[in-house]
Amino acid sequence: MSITLSRAQLAQLNKRGIKIHASKGAEEIRLPDTPHPLERYSNHSPSGIMPLGAYSYSHSFCRGISWIGRYCSIGTGLNLITNTHPTDRVSSSPVFYSNRKFREWGGSREGFEHVVPFEEESADVTIGHDVWIGGNVSIRAGVRIGNGAVIAGGATVTKDVPPYAIVGGLPAKLIRMRFDEQTVEALLATEWWQYPAPQLIELSPHAPHIFIEKFGHALAEGKLKKQPEERLAFRTIVRNLGRSK
């Protein structure tokens, strides 16, 4: 599924907080999009539209991701691992579980009754808030990336990643936690990603412990107002461009 956008439409999208880094010169671009909704204040690669939350950017396009939170940073070369094989059988070859392959490689229809299908459940990937994914990362279908997690470049992620964990390697393993357990719990409790960046910048986000303290005071004093999550399908956003002033 893809969509064609003119230069004028790209400019309109940019004014509405959705930026697509298209190459200069072309009068229009055609790019894949996602059926899953996204938020404004998001930056997308010319290789395709991703279901990004506000204040997130992606230098990749990857199908099979149904939701990406706010304040996320995604590098180039993101890839999903969807083609799996059985590992608990005599052979992992599809010739033994695919009628098509069995027939293609010399079998007859009479042998179909002995072909035992293999269909591993394949769910979409979901990525939490404030996640940083380095370049050339592969993620297995169905994996959930927790809030605040960091995925090192070149990693292959085969299991769910806990909040605020830094993982890397092949397969990806825990390198360390970003913060101690108490700080992680405090940050998760604030759910700070529900608030717009202009409000948060005044709370010292460069210093976690100071931020947590200031956030609590600002919240108690009624100085913080949540930014509602308003996601729309990209095609709906494009259709509405001509209707809005």
Image (cartoon, rainbow, N blue to C red):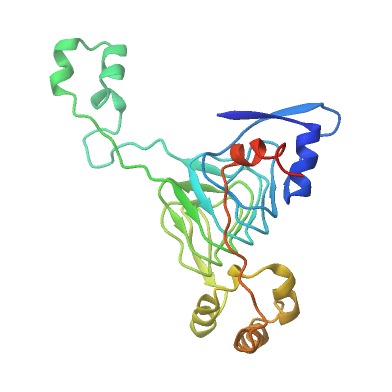
**Closer-to-camera residue (197/230):** 230
Horizontal and vertical percent position of residue 230: 58, 56
Residue 20 shows in this picture: no
Horizontal and vertical percent position of residue 54: 64, 58
Residue 125 shows in this picture: yes
Q: What residue appears at the point 71 percent right and 68 percent down from the top-left corner?
A: 197
From this view, report whether residue 206 is shown above or below residue 57. below
From this view, report whether residue 62 is shown above or below residue 99. below
**Closer-to-camera residue (154/161):** 161
Where residue 5 sits, quadrant-wise, is: top right
Horizontal and vertical percent position of residue 243: 70, 39
Q: Which quadrant of the rendered structure holds the C terminus?
A: top right
From this view, report whether residue 80 is shown above or below residue 93. below
Tell me if 243 is positioned left or right of 90 in this view: right
Where residue 71 sits, quadrant-wise, is: bottom right
Q: Outermost residue, right direction?
A: 25
Q: Which quadrant of the rendered structure holds the N terminus?
A: top right
Q: What residue appears at the point 74 percent right and 49 percent down from the top-left corner?
A: 16
Q: What residue appears at the point 14 percent right and 23 percent down from the top-left corner?
A: 114
Number of labels in the image equals 0
Where residue 111 sits, quadrant-wise, is: top left
Horizontal and vertical percent position of residue 4: 68, 28
